[in-house]
Amino acid sequence: MSQSFKKVHAITGMKDILPDTSHEWLALESLMQQWLAAYGYRNIRTPVLEHTRLFARGIGEVTDIVEKEMYSFTDVLNNDRLTMRPEFTAGIVRAAIEHNMLYDRPHRLYTQGPVFRHERPQRGRYRQFHQISVEALGMPGPDIDAEHILMLARLWKMLGLDDIRLELNCLGQSAERAAHRQALIAYLEKHVDILDEDARRRMYTNPLRVLDTKNPALQTMANEAPALEQFLGDESRAHFQGVRDRLDEAGIAYKLNPRLVRGLDYYNLTVFEWITDRLGAQGTVCGGGRYDDLFALLGGKPAPATGFAIGLERLLDLWAQARPIAHPAECQVYLIHQGDAAQRVAMQVAEQLRDNDLRVIVHAGSTGFKSQFRRADASGAKAAVIIGPDELTAGTASVKWLRADAASAQQQQAIELADLATYLKTKV
Ligand code: ATP
Ligand code: MG
């Protein structure tokens, strides 16, 4: 007896990618493979689940992500506190430490997949979304920060996107930020009466983030706050200058944004974001920067590192706006048949065609010729190959070209089964 079952829907903010749009993902992913290969980046894959304390420590206790966006739960089998990764960097650094990956060489790495953040869903903001994360581990110089930015400029060019702008900042080193922080707290204390609740809550825990406020009433206060730039030492300045020089040499334009702090605590020196006006409120396509302190923070031997993450939903939205992404044909050859015996022959013929690198669909089931032709046409196949009772007796197949001009499309040509693959291969 069947019991009634309440229909299940996908979880809010977590989207199905259906076959009518998955081709866009595949096209983007294959282009990105070429792009990453052009710079010699190798793939790494880490688990979706990590211990919660990895992110709490790595991303920072007082960040938006850790405070309110993580999918965390207790594993009922052993009471472990686990979290579904909200980003990739902490997991990759964990893996690099765990496997002692930097003992004899630096690494250029990338990974891609779903990440999870409990946010309010809207265009460009989901609870499961996809990132491609690129990390250079064990490389201290400004050359590699610049390489990442050059790389991204190339990606936008490959995608035909010309309206993503770059914002850049230098966060200095932790001692420099600490000195700035003291000055900032003193400044915020002077203005405490105009601060909103959010700003007051954060002024001692994360005063830098207070300057990132969207509250219009606080903009003047934020603009006039002591700037980190004044607290940077010679080495930090030289590093930043090294990045800027290389961007200038590559002809890459950028805007310096002293307020750019990024939502994760682990950054130092260079940070950057790529932003567009074409995506409404969710305009940041990519964010990244240097995180030289993260290895030590996670218990590893100190090692320099820098990286970035691209939000793929946002990038795809932008790409699809720039040009339609054609739906590829489902196959080259669509096999039509009539009757049980013909179906069996069609199956064998299809295998032979596949042996010859043709992409083939055999019509499933035994519907009428007319509906089979309709499916053949809709599949985008170049040719329909028909095996009916007559062909069966003659040991042939009839080929009908589906994309040819009207005159030649009328013609159906009988081909010996033995010659079929060769005949089709020269024409599809
Ligand atoms: P935002 O300010 O938009 O929340 P973020 O600073 O939290 O972004 P990062 O942690 O830097 O984002 O993640 C890198 C990229 O991932 C972002 O630039 C954006 O393109 C994308 N991204 C971040 N959060 C989401 C989300 N909830 N849904 C879809 N894409 C996202
Ligand atoms: Mg965010």
Image (cartoon, rainbow, N blue to C red):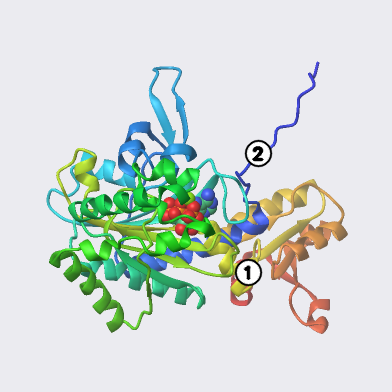
Q: Is residue 329 left or right of residue 307?
A: right
Mark 1–mark 2 distance (CA, rounded to whole Å): 49 Å
Give residue 139's position: percent from left, percent from top. Answer: 19, 60
Front one among 235 and 317? 235
Residue 22, image quadrant: bottom right
The reply to whether the residue tagged 1 has its Cβ within 8 angstroms of ligand 1 is: no
Mark 1 or mark 2: whose residue is earlier in sequence: 2
Numbered label attached to residue 10: 2
- Which residue position holds label 1? 419
Q: Amino acid at mark 2?
A: Ala
Residue 353: in sight, yes or no?
A: no
Q: Is residue 255 left or right of residue 405?
A: left
Front one among 401 and 314? 314
Q: Amino acid at mark 1?
A: Asp
Secondary element type, mark 1: helix
Residue 419, image quadrant: bottom right
Give residue 4's position: percent from left, percent from top. Answer: 80, 21
Count of numbered badges drawn on the protein: 2
Residue at position x 36%, y 79% in the image: 252
Give residue 60's position: percent from left, percent from top. Answer: 34, 42
Q: Is residue 383 above or below residue 338?
A: below
Secondary element type, mark 2: loop
